[in-house]
């Protein structure tokens, strides 16, 4: 470990480095004395102060005047620093590098409370022994293998290199059998070509090529490692690793004679054909543990050098110090002096950049003759001219040299100008310079600006419309004289701002390609853009599929017509979309055809040399078809084998001659129509085989045509990949086979549903999505908060979904706020995505919430995945989850079902097996651990909606409940009918499909109007108690009145009676007590206005028949009154609004005297009786006779008490005394174990009253 804790470099600081505040670009440089391998850095602020650095840049190198910037993943060169003076911030490098010198540039620091730069540094690493060799392109090193060859199962090569060239061979060796290995630079990229040998028998090419990196000609050290075991290869460049399986079938690498380092130079062969030798430095070249440079330096006998190079090898790295500079700031510029008033202008420099536009050079001529501007601009050559100003712009896409100038490589610009002539040469191509002839005069100015114009103190009037240049420059010549930047700046002949001197900090953000699914990457200096055209994907990094995952998904999204559809079973996964036929007529079948659907003739095959028929599916690879089958609910495929003296499965106990291969490359020895792995054909299952001794028709081996055919329907074995046939070589033997198209329907990933009923969680395998990830699922719950999935933490307030994640040093989140609650027990769709550009959260069809990341952000994820609770048990999610996908891959939720742990299959919670169900139409609201009953749309109260709400009406008392105050317009009715034409929709106060009326009553007086429902026309519904005590139902609809007799006996007997009237479409059912009647057809009742109880009062016309029963009014009890969703008594006695729409007159008080009698008492008495019997039977045998007598006596006593109790209960609250019972808490309206509504099948028809009654 290297350590430097306290470096006091200025009197203004203490216990650390603190530069002068007057220094505009301070840096701290560390000389380690020797080369070290550095792995991490830690920083602190100045002790006991407000001085600390919040972010900084780190440069390293072998020399104090040539630097390499450390670049984090994503291309960011700024490391995070401290947030106070005492805590240590440690940054572990994503790849270790070697260096002797380090330089730290503070980029941000604390400024509060007078704070300034303050730094203490600690480095972590180990000493590094360096063996270096310089290659000039005409030299090489050859290492001869012991015994003349090298045959290896595993290899480990390692080397470091740096160069200014874009091409060159680093390693090369080959064998006589076609084996070879080559490591080379090509156009600034590193290529590995390796072959274990090719096969002429199977016609396979064993060569495999791997590529890493870009812009490797930066004179920075790069670290290469090649590890191979058999056909598996790991190829690493700096921090980037590529893994591959080599082509071919061989495992060993056979190399002959020698391996070349730095190029191939033999007699009369100066280099490999089409390649150039390496020019630059190499360090510590290891070939399977042998240090080649060390062996060369000590002249070991296995080493051979190029001819004439024995005494000229250099074992030091001779750097070419071009002193590059990096323009990386928003206000960067470089100002240099020039010779004044010369009649010839000459400027030459090199630059490299990714940007499309930017100012390269600007100068203003003397004597107000104008100015000259050179820059990268839009794809055209622009020459603007006026009286005093001349401008020339070099196009970004200018093909003067045959390629673009923003490709990241070094380009040379040579500009000369004299009177009436301007010449520009790109990349020293003298054959095609750009010449501009115009009448103008050249008198050079005294200042030249590179990269931009000064923002302040712009006395030279540097004016441009171009943006600032971002990139690197070097080798600047002005008036044919090289410019020494260090001398210019030391003598203050020049100025600069936001420039890094001595290094080129360009990085390639498109290598490796951050765009997924073959998206094209376009980059600038500090960002990149993915072009997703024609890929089938969309998004910032081409991550999201534009297609649905299945035909079922298309159908659920409103696509009901059959035809060709493009599907993507793994959505954002690696598999490509493909086209299938969707038959939407039934179950949305997915159909995929292939090349073996027609009958194929087979002959001449044996078990040792069988016929192999591979199936090539149309528009889809094998992996893509398999993914479709795995996500479907059901798949089937027809298979047929026709035979003439050709056996199939060789049943019952022989080795199969023919079999088929399906999913996971497994062979299956059963045929269509039979059970999986049964070893039979379909005829054996149906017992229709030609010969009952065999399980297949073809196994009888007859000299006539037979066939075995049927559907393969075990989804885990499908689709069929290959048919293997092995018994057609005998005389006269012949077979034909065909395989039908693959048919699949359903999507188990959509309907894969579980319910969390306890505080628990699911554990899935480690999730390794890489640089982008997405999570999609559906949920439903009544809970107000909970965690869906943890690895990124989502929790749910009532109207919010929050996506929490960690990027860099901080925890961040994306919050989506819904205009309505999300805990409404309806299904909601959630999609969360995170990539290097942003984090996005989408719920249902709401606009997404987005959190954008700063440029150059890198994200990598490798974590365990939990579903159901954050930190396993905190803030548990209780509800239902379905269709969970991670990066497009469905996760098997139903496979995690565990009832004891509180994980149920399908969306079933506590309401499924409720100990006491919700009564009287109450809605069960599932809390999944518990449940509650919603009684809002019932006429009852209580925890289970079992408590009756009733009232006692004295003579002349009445109650009116106003349903609507104005009639419903036709437009509103029509819109409501088409938008929600459901039987349970009562948005308008009524429903054209259904009416439901129920109540219970008790009285001793008749006649009376029990319930009356008025309308905005003359229509009404009335339930009347006639003079003889019978019940009558009357409908008036238009000009027709309908009269129905509900009972034949006197109901004014003081006992409670239950009444229910239900209409569905044009048919009504009635129930009075336990007697149910049906059915008669009537038109629907529209536009209800008010509900009346007791009497009908108001300014409206009332039928004579109603008037006859309306006076003196009802006196008695009514309970549990409900019309559709309206409960008048509940609205009056349990109002949930400030002014309920209820009007009363007379004496109306709450009472349960009209409630229908419960049966709970009899159950209690029976239980007491059984307990008495049990107690009696436990007495001593010696007094058994006495026990029998006592038992009989007790039974008689309990029967008498029971009879008295029932008699007194039935008359409790009756009107012998005309005194109602006052209620503080309503009692049960019905027993919790009883169901009042009976089966309505085979019911007698209601009798219609005679007209003269």
Image (tube, rainbow, N blue to C red):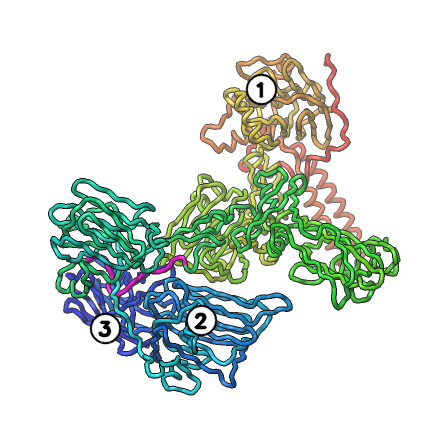
Q: Residue at x 37, y 59 (%)?
A: 508
User: Does dot 1 land on a helix, a strand or a loop?
Assistant: strand
Quadrant of the snapshot with the C terminus: top right
Is-magenta flag for residue 502? yes
The reply, left or right, for residue 1021 in relation to residue 332 is: right
In percent of width and height, residue 350 lies at 27, 59
Q: Residues within 10 Å of mark 2 (few under 14, many from 20)?
A: some
Quadrant housing residue 346: bottom left
Between 1061 and 1191, the residue placed more toward the observer is 1061
In percent of width and height, residue 813 lies at 40, 52
In percent of width and height, residue 354 lies at 34, 55
In percent of width and height, residue 82 lies at 29, 63
The disc at residue 272 is 2
Quadrant of the snapshot with the N terminus: bottom left
Q: Which residue is drawn at 60% across and 32% down?
A: 982
Lower sequence index among marks 3 and 2: 3
- Secondary structure predominantly adopted by residues drawn in magenta: loop
Q: Can residue 639 be seen in this view?
A: yes
Q: How crowded is mark 1: few (under 14 residues within 10 Å), some or many (20 or more)?
A: many
Label 3 vs label 2, nearer the camera: 2
Lower sequence index among marks 1 and 2: 2
User: Does dot 3 land on a helix, a strand or a loop?
Assistant: loop
Q: In this view, does 1192 lie above or below 1082?
A: below
Label 1 belongs to which residue? Answer: 1014
Label 3 belongs to which residue? Answer: 6
Between 997 and 266, the residue placed more toward the observer is 266
User: Does dot 2 land on a helix, a strand or a loop?
Assistant: loop
The reply, left or right, for residue 1245 in relation to residue 329 is: right
Q: How crowded is mark 3: few (under 14 residues within 10 Å), some or many (20 or more)?
A: some
Q: Which residues fall within the magenta stretch?
A: 496-510
Label 3 vs label 1, nearer the camera: 3
Q: Which residue is drawn at 35% across and 65% down?
A: 217
């Amino acid at each position: 470990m290297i350590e430097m804790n306290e470096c006091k470099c200025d009197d203004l600081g203490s216990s650390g480095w603190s530069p002068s505040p007057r220094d505009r670009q301070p840096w701290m440089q560390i000389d380690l004395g020797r080369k070290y391998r550095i792995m991490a850095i830690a920083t602190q602020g100045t002790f006991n102060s407000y001085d600390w650095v919040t972010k900084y840049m780190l440069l390293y190198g072998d020399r104090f005047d040539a630097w390499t910037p450390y670049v984090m993943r994503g291309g960011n060169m700024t490391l995070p620093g401290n947030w106070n003076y005492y805590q240590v911030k440690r940054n572990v490098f994503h790849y270790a590098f070697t260096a002797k010198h380090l330089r730290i540039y503070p980029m941000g620091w604390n400024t509060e409370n007078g704070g300034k730069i303050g730094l203490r540094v600690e480095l972590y690493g180990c000493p590094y022994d360096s063996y270096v060799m310089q290659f000039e392109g005409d030299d090489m090193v050859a290492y001869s293998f012991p015994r003349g060859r090298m045959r290896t199962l595993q290899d480990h090569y390692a080397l470091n290199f740096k160069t200014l060239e874009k091409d060159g061979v680093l390693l090369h060796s080959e064998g006589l059998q076609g084996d070879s290995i080559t490591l080379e630079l090509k156009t600034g990229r590193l290529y590995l070509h390796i072959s274990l040998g090719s096969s002429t028998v199977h016609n396979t090419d064993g060569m495999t090529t791997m590529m890493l990196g870009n812009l490797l000609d930066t004179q920075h050290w790069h670290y290469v490692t090649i590890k191979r075991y058999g056909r598996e290869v790991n190829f690493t460049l700096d921090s980037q690793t590529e893994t591959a399986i080599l082509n071919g079938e061989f495992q060993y690498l056979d190399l002959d004679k020698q391996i070349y380092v730095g190029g191939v130079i033999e007699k009369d062969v100066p280099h490999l054909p089409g390649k150039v030798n390496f020019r630059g430095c190499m360090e510590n070249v290891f070939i399977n543990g042998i240090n080649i440079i060390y062996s060369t330096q000590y002249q070991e006998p296995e080493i051979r050098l190029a001819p004439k190079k024995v005494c000229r090898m250099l074992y030091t790295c001779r750097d070419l110090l071009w002193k590059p500079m990096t323009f990386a700031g928003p206000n960067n510029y470089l100002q240099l002096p020039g010779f004044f008033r010369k009649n010839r202008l000459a400027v030459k420099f090199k630059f490299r950049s990714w940007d499309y536009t930017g100012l390269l050079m600007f100068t203003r001529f003397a004597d107000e003759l104008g100015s000259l501007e050179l820059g990268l601009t839009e794809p055209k050559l622009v020459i603007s001219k006026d009286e005093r100003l001349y401008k020339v712009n070099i196009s970004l896409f200018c093909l003067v040299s045959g390629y673009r100038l923003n490709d990241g490589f070094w380009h040379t610009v040579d500009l000369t100008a004299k009177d009436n002539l301007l010449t520009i040469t790109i990349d020293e191509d003298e054959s095609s310079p750009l010449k501009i002839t115009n009448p103008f005069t050249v008198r050079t100015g005294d200042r030249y600006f590179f990269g931009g114009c000064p923002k302040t103190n712009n006395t030279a009037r540097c004016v441009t419309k171009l943006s600032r240049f971002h990139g690197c420059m070097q080798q600047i010549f002005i008036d044919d004289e090289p410019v020494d930047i260090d001398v210019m700046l030391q003598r203050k002949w020049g100025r600069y701002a936001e420039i890094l001197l001595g290094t080129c900090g360009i990085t390639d953000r498109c290598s490796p390609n951050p765009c997924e699914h073959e998206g094209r990457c376009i980059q600038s200096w500090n960002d990149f853009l993915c072009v997703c055209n024609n890929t089938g994907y969309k998004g910032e990094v081409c991550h999201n599929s534009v297609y649905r995952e299945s035909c079922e998904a298309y159908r659920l999204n409103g696509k009901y017509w059959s035809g060709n559809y493009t599907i993507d079973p793994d959505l954002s996964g690696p598999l490509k979309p493909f086209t299938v036929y969707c038959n939407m007529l039934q179950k949305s079948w997915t159909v995929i055809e292939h090349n073996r659907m027609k009958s194929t003739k087979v002959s001449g095959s044996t078990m040792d040399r069988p016929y192999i028929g591979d199936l090539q599916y149309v528009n889809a690879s094998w992996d893509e078809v398999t993914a479709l089958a795995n996500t479907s609910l059901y798949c089937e495929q027809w298979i047929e084998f026709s035979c003439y003296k050709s056996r199939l499965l060789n049943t019952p106990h022989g080795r199969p001659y023919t079999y088929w291969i399906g999913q996971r490359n497994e062979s299956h020895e059963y045929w269509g129509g039979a059970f999986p792995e049964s070893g039979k054909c379909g005829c054996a299952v149906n017992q229709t085989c030609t010969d009952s001794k065999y399980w297949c028709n073809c196994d009888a081996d007859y000299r006539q045509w037979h066939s075995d055919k049927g559907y393969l329907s075990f989804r885990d074995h499908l689709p069929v990949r290959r048919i293997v046939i092995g018994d057609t070589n005998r005389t006269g033997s012949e077979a034909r086979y065909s395989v039908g198209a693959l048919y699949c329907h359903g999507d188990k990933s959509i309907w894969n549903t579980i319910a969390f009923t306890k505080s628990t969680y699911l554990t899935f395998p480690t999730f390794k999505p890489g640089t982008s990830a997405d999570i999609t699922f559906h949920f439903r719950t009544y809970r107000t908060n909970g965690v869906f999935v943890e690895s990124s933490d989502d929790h749910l307030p009532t109207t919010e979904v929050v996506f929490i994640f960690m990027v860099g040093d901080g925890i961040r989140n994306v919050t989506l706020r819904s205009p309505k609650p999300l805990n409404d027990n309806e299904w909601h769709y959630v999609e969360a995505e995170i990539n290097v550009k942003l984090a996005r959260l989408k719920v249902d069809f709401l606009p997404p919430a987005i959190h954008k990341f700063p440029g150059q952000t890198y994200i990598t994820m490798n974590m365990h995945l939990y579903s159901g609770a954050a930190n396993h048990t905190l803030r548990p999610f209780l509800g239902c989850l379905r269709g969970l996908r991670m990066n497009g891959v469905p996760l098997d939720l139903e496979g995690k079902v565990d009832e004891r742990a509180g994980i149920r299959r399908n969306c079933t919670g506590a309401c499924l097996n409720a100990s006491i169900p919700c009564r009287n139409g109450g809605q069960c609201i599932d809390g999944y651990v518990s449940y509650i009953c919603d009684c809002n749309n019932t006429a009852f109260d209580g925890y289970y909606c079992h408590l009756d709400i009733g009232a006692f009406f004295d003579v002349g008392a009445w109650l009116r409940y106003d349903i609507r105050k104005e009639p419903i317009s036709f437009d509103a009715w029509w819109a409501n009918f088409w938008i929600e034409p459901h039987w349970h929709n009562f948005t308008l106060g009524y429903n054209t499909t259904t009416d439901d009326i129920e109540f219970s009553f008790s009285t001793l007086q008749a006649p009376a109007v029990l319930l009356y429902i008025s309308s905005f026309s003359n229509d009404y519904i009335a339930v009347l108690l006639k003079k003889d005590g019978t019940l009558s139902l009357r409908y008036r609809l238009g000009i027709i009145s309908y009269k129905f007799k509900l009972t034949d006996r006197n109901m004014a007997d003081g006992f409670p009676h239950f009444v229910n009237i239900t209409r569905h479409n044009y048919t009504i059912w009635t129930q009075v007590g336990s007697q149910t009647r049906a059915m008669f057809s009537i038109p629907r009742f529209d536009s209800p206005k008010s509900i009346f109880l007791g009497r009908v009062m108001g300014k409206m016309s009332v039928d004579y028949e109603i008037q006859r029963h309306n006076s003196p009014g009802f006196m008695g009890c009514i309970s549990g009154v409900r019309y559709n969703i309206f409960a008048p008594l509940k609205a009056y006695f349990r109002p949930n609004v400030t002014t309920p729409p209820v009007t009363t007159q007379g004496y109306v008080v709450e009472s349960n005297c009209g409630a229908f009698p419960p049966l709970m008492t009899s159950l209690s008495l029976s239980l007491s009786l059984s307990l008495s019997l049990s107690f009696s039977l436990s007495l001593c045998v010696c007094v058994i006779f006495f026990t029998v007598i006592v038992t009989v006596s007790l039974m008689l006593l309990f029967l008498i008490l029971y009879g008295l109790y029932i008699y007194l209960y039935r008359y409790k609250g009756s009107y012998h005394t005309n005194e109602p019972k006052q209620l503080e808490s309503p009692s049960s309206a019905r027993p919790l174990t009883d169901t009042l509504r009976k089966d309505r099948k085979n019911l007698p028809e209601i009798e219609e009253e005679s007209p003269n009654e």
